[in-house]
Structure formats: structure tokens, C-alpha cells
Image (cartoon, rainbow, N blue to C red):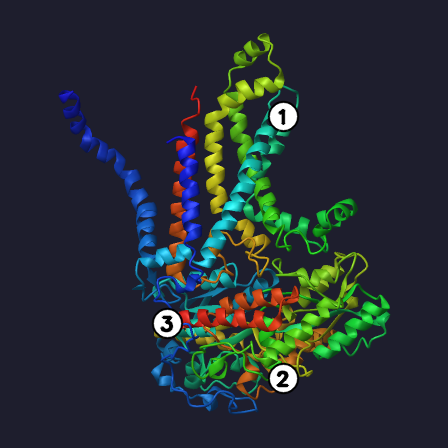
Amino acid sequence: MAKRTRSRWRDLPTAVWMLTPSLVILSVFVLYPLGQAIWLGHQRCDSQGDNCRSNGWDQYVDVARSDEFLHALGVTVKFVVLTVPIGLALGVGLAMLADKYLRGIGVFRAVFSSTVATSVAVASLMWLFLLQPDVGVLANVGFIEELFPVVKQPGLVRDPGTALGAVAASSIWANLGFTFILVTAGLQGIPRDLHEAAVVDGAGGVRRFWDVTLPLLGPTLLFVMIALTSRAFQAYGEMDLLTDGGPRPQDSTTTLTYLTYGGDSVINNNDGLQAATAVLLFAVLLVVSIVQLGAIGRRIHYA
Amino acid sequence: MSRGVGVGVLGVLGVVVAACGSGQSILQAGNEPLPTVATTTTVAGPPVTAAPGETLAPTVPPTVATTTTTPLDTLAPCPVDALDDASGPVEITFWHGLGAQLETVLTDLTQQYNRSQDRVRVRLENQGGYNQTIDKYVQSRQESRPELVMFPEYMVQQIADTESVIPVGACVQASGFDTSAFLPRTLLAYQTNGVQWSMPFNVSVPVLYFNRKAFVAAGVDVDDPPLSIEDVRSYSQAIVDSGAAGVGMAFDSGVDSGGGWFIEQWFAKAGELYADNGNGRLAPATRVLYDGAVGVELMTRVQSMITDGIAVTVGDNASGQDALLKLADQQSPAAMTIATSAALGTIISALDGGLIPGLTSADVGVGPMPGPGGTPSALVGGASLYVVADKGDAEAAAAWDYIQFLVGAETQATWAAGTGYVPVRQDALELEPLASTYRDDPRFKVAYDQLTAAADDLAAVGPVIGPLREVRGVTAGAVAAIFDGADVASSLAGAAAQSNALIADYNARN
């Protein structure tokens, strides 16, 4: 034991030396800016971000309790709850469909994963013009219009009740390729013989999905879920391009990121408050990730 | 940690945060609790030499010198002669936010300028848009900033407060530059307390776009589009009654259109101040005035058109085109809308390209922006040029030399004809290619004609407010609510209170 400890200490200089490159990069590009942001969050600055003075650390508490922050937090949580489960289910579904040994399946895999090559901006603009009520393609299909008048009047992204859902749909679509690729890789990692054994034991397709596929996909799904959750908390482009945080005055799609960075946000030229909301978003995301890892991670079977 | 604990933690966090909601605005975070009575913040600023509402000296084309009340020598000087001492060409960088056709014309003009002389080399840097330019500029240290920069009209006070620019007025004065041919409004838009902060370059104003076929079908005079709010109502009624179009007018509540910018326009047309301290031009504004009787009456009239079904709102105009696209709606099109004059060129080329079946570019009519008062006039929109300070004397002189080229009569004639912007000076109209553009298609001249009306008082030149863009945002929220049927007086009062909080917060920080 003592010998092992001594040899560990002997390795320390080497370890530090080898860690230095990533430590430097991490410090310069992550830790230092994070520290700066936390510091800035208790300050008020002029509109150039200069001449900062402390406004007390209670600024964080007040920001967290303010109407705008709580509203944005609520919108963000709704957005996450809308996008993550649906995105995950659709991604798994598509991956199951494409997990077949058929001629030409590669074409489908390419199509299903194609949204990963679509930037948020392109995806959002595409949806904007699909949903535009006057000339949009989706809004002017006769039967859709009759079934859902809101598509036309006032329009999905213009109605305060449907705007967040419409934005979430665009986000789910854009993230589908990412989920599909990871789940497909996960599926290919499941040994064939387990399925064959299950078939021999008389398990049907549904039973095999729940008892073989899903448990073995656990680690993949956990990763995808955490990634999708943190993406959803940090989604910005969709709101910026589709709704500008609106429709007003309900601000139905003003998420925490839009409140922080949005061009039409009330704190747009107020660096101190922007830093405070960003740090609080970081804190929320940290808690959520710990909970996800702790609560679900334990139950995952790592084969 | 088991799942139960995890869910529990989340739940407790949620309850704690929700229970602790302070009911306060984020702008008050960290501040001492405010007294319950709305405070009017006293602000240290340039000395007030005229009362709000007092006339701004000249009704003839004013020169900067005649309206100067703040001595320019307290501000950064403009070393206009420094170019003579420079050895070799002086290179300057110009940040702008123009894209597509606008950028092409600007690039051509700049190449022409660079070739025409060997003292200055201008390098254009497209920042991707106005907001990107603003963000990059305010976040940069002075040494990373360019020598010349373009900002949209709502930035005057904020840039003045950065103390990072040489007021263009100093250059005008030092070089004896003749501004007598300028449209007075284009210069006045960028003045506070007599200081000319920037040089107008690309000017646009809101105009009325209408479907000529719908006007004809409704039997209203297609050559006499509505000028007042009452006219808009009667035209809309005629259009709906005749079935010529689904609705008369399409309004929007966008920040840089119907929810913000147009409201400022309407106050100017009504001859009413939008903000105190002479629209913020005598001293920094401390509050907005749009929740008074004038604003309530105006917005009530607009609201009644929508509730009566002869006008419609297209919402926040997030795509920037929603109001115009309502004219092309396949089911219930509008016959008119208000949008920036800068859109005319795009509209004509889109319709010529057959984008909208059944609508040709000849069907598009253009009229002055209707509003209170019923006479053609408008506030200057678009962007202007700021000379950045502390970049070296030769560089400042070079920037000024280039500005003089950009706002010269010949350049403006090419610029306006190529882009659809309004020329900043009258003598550009006599020159080609603008002369033939205006002769061949008078629709382009409507925007210009609105700016020739005299700007004879501070109400007519519009507001200058530090957080003007944020004020527009909260105003747009109230406009959207009013369009949806909310109580006009209380909506405007709520937005005004929020705007005043934004202004107080800004003034306390800057």
C-alpha cells in the first residue's frame, strides 16, 4: 500500500506535465470565462460592458426571483419536456426501422440521419416558410387548414398557445439525425445471438424490444437523453429565427437563452444581468444533469 | 442517489424557486427596493438650453453650426487636415451591416473611391447585420474597433454615451463642409443637443404599400392613397364592403416596424413628443410620453379597425416580411400595409420573378405612410456613419474624406438608384442615374418626398433614447396586446412604466 502511494506521487510531475496542454486550454477557454461570467453576474456595467461596479451578490437571488427569469425558466422547462421525450422516442423508432438487413437500407439511414448536417439556422428558416400562414406550404394545405384553423389564423408560430410547440417541432426535427445515428450505433452493438436466444425462448418482437433491445441500449439512451436535455436547455437559434422570443406580449418562447442573448430581450444591453441569467442557466443545467446521472444512471446496465 | 431522491430534489427546487418569486422586474435585481411612487431620475447631462417643445432653430436647411448648443471643443476634435501630413496611403476599415444588393453597390462605390485617389484605402468589413455590428462594436476594446462604423438609427444615444466617436459635426465644422443641399431631417435625426454625432448615409422611411387592383375593384382612388388614420379606415371599409380584398389594412407589431418604429413615426406626425427632454435631444430622456391622451386616442382608432374586422394584425413580424406577405394571402389578403421603403426594390423583383401568382409588380402602389395629421412626413430610418476616435489623426481624416465621398451628390445619386434608399441630399435628384429612376418609376420617389417636409420642432425629429431598442420591445408588447383587444390605456401605461424602468436603469449605468 505504502509503496503504491509512493509510486503514485513519483508519477505526479509526469502527470502534471501530460495534463498541462488540456489544462491550459480548459483554463483559458472554459474556466477563466466561467469565473469572469460569475463575477460579472453581480455587477452592473454601462452598455459597452465597461465601468462595472458591484451591485451586490444578491443580484443573483433577485434575478432568480424576478418575473422575467421565472417566466423564461418555465418556458425552458416546457420546451425540454416537449422536445426530449418525443425526440428520443422518434429517434429510437426510426433507428429500429432502419436496423434491418435489407438491400438499399443505407439510403434510408442516410435520409434519417441527414438532419444532423442541417444547421439550426437552415432548419429554422425552412420551418418558418413551411409554417408562414399566408404563403407557407403547410399552412395552405386544404385539409390541414380545416382540421386545425390555427395553422392559418393566426398561424402556428404566431399563436401564443402553439408557438412553443411549433418551435419544439422544428427543434425535434433538427435533432432527429443526431439521435438516430447514436441509437443506430447502439443497436449495432447488441449481440445478435441474444435476439436469437430470445426467439428460441419464444419471445415476440415486442417482448424482445422491451426485454433485450431497450436494456442493452441503456447507456446509449442515457447519453442521448443527457445530450438532448442539455441541447434543449441551450437551444437558441430556433427561437431567434422563428419567433424572436414571441409572440408578444406573452413572450411564449422567451427561454432562458433568449432572455440572455436575444436581440429583443429586455436585458439586451445589460451585461451584468445577462451574465447572471447565463450563470443561473448553468446552475440549473448542472443540477438537472446530476439528477439524470444519479437517478437513472444507477439503473443502467453496462454490458 | 435513487430516482426518488432525484425527483424529490428537482421538485423541492421548483417549489422553492416558484414560492420565492419576487414579482419584481429583472431590471431591479440587486438594487435597493424602489419607492412606490415612480421616480423621475435626475440625470447629469449637457446643460439644457431650451425647454422641451421649443422650436429647433431653423426651418430652412440647417447647418450643424446654427444648431450647436454644446461647444464642440468639449468633444473629440476632428483633425481633417491630418491627411496632408501622412506619408503614403492611409488604410482604414469600415464595418457595415449591409448584405446582398446593398453590399454590391457599396463595394462598387468604395472601389471607385479607392481608385480615384491615392491617399486613402478603405477596406470594407461586412459584420453580417446591424445587430451583429452593434454587438461586436460594444464588446470590443477601442483598439480593435474600426476607423469607421455604420449603426442603425436607434443607436444615437448609446453610441454618444460610449464616448468612443468623433462627432461628425466636428469634421463638418473643421473642414467647412457644405451641408446646405442635405435634407434637413436626415441630419437632424442624428443630432442631440446640437451635436451632429453621425453622417446619414442609407436612409429609409416607412411607406404605404397597396394592391392597386384591390383599390380599383373597391372603387377608391388608386392615385390618392389614404393619408390619415381616418382615411385608412374609410378605404378599408370600402375595400371590405366591396369584397375587393379580405381586409383593408394589415398591421404588425414588430419591434422595428409596427410595434416600435411606426409608433415613433406616428407621434412625430402628430407633432407630439415621444420622450421627455425634447425627445431626448436636449438632455438624455428620462421617460416616454406615449401613454398620454394622444397615444391612447391613436391606438384606440387603430384597434377599432382590427376589432371591426376591416384591418388585421400579422403579429410580431418575426420573419420581417409577414405584413407584406399578407397582401399575397391566398384566402383573405389585405389590400394595404405599411413597411420600409427599402423593401420596394425587393418587392418589384420578387413579383417580376412570378413569386406570387396573380400579382405583378405593376399592381403594387406606393403612398406616403398614413398617420395622424394626414400630411406626408416621416422620421429618418436606416443607418448612419460614425468616425471612431483615438485611431490616429490621419485615420480620422481619411474616414472623413471617405464620408464626404459617400454623401456627395453623385455618389448619393448612384447609391439611391442602385439600392432604393432615399438620397440624403436634394441635388442628387438632378443627377443620373437617380433622375431617370425617379422619372421612370415615381413609386421610388414617394419615400423621398416624405422627408422634404420641414422638421420644425423637436417632436418632428423623433426620439433619441439610450435603450431605444429595448423600449421598442416593450412598446411592441403593448401594441400586440392592443391589437388583440386589450385595454388601450392600461396597456400603454404598463409599457410606459417598463420603458421608464429601462431608461432609468440605462441612465444609472451610463
> Depth check: A216 or B352 in front?
A216
Give the distance between the C-alpha atoms of the residues marked 2 and 1, in whole angstroms: 67 Å
Q: Position of residue B243 (x, y in %)?
A: 85, 66
**What's the amino acid at mark 3?**
Ala
Element at label 2: loop
The image's mark for residue B202 is none
Q: Give the mark nearer the N terminus: 3 vs 2.
A: 2
Query: Where B185 falls versus A259 (above or below)?
Result: below
Question: Is B362 placed above or below A184 here?
Answer: below
Q: Nearer the viewer, residue B435 or B12?
A: B12
Q: Residue B210: which quarter of the image?
A: bottom right
Q: Position of residue B446 (x, y in %)?
A: 69, 77
Q: CA distance from mark 3 to mark 2?
A: 38 Å
Q: What separation in Å lies between label 3 and label 1 (alpha carbons)?
A: 60 Å
In this view of the protein, which residue sits in the foreground, A185 or B293?
A: B293
Q: Position of residue A252 (x, y in %)?
A: 56, 54
| Residue carrying label 2 | B452
Crowding at label 1, few (<14), some or many (≥20) Cα neighbours within 10 Å?
few
- Horizontal side of A236 relative to B213 (left or right) equals left
Which of labels 3 and 2 is toward the front? 3
Mark 2: which amino acid?
Answer: Thr
Tell me the mark number nearer the camera, choosing from 2 and 1: 1
Which disc, if any, is residue A97?
1
The amino acid type, in three-letter code, at marker 1 is Leu
Q: Quadrant of the N terminus of chain B?
A: top left
The residue sitting at 58% across, 37% down in the picture is: A86
Query: In the image shown, does A167 or B100 lie closer to the viewer?
Result: A167
Label 1 marks a residue whose chain is A
Q: Looking at the figure, which quarter contains the C terminus of chain B?
A: bottom left
Q: Which residue is mark 3?
A: B508
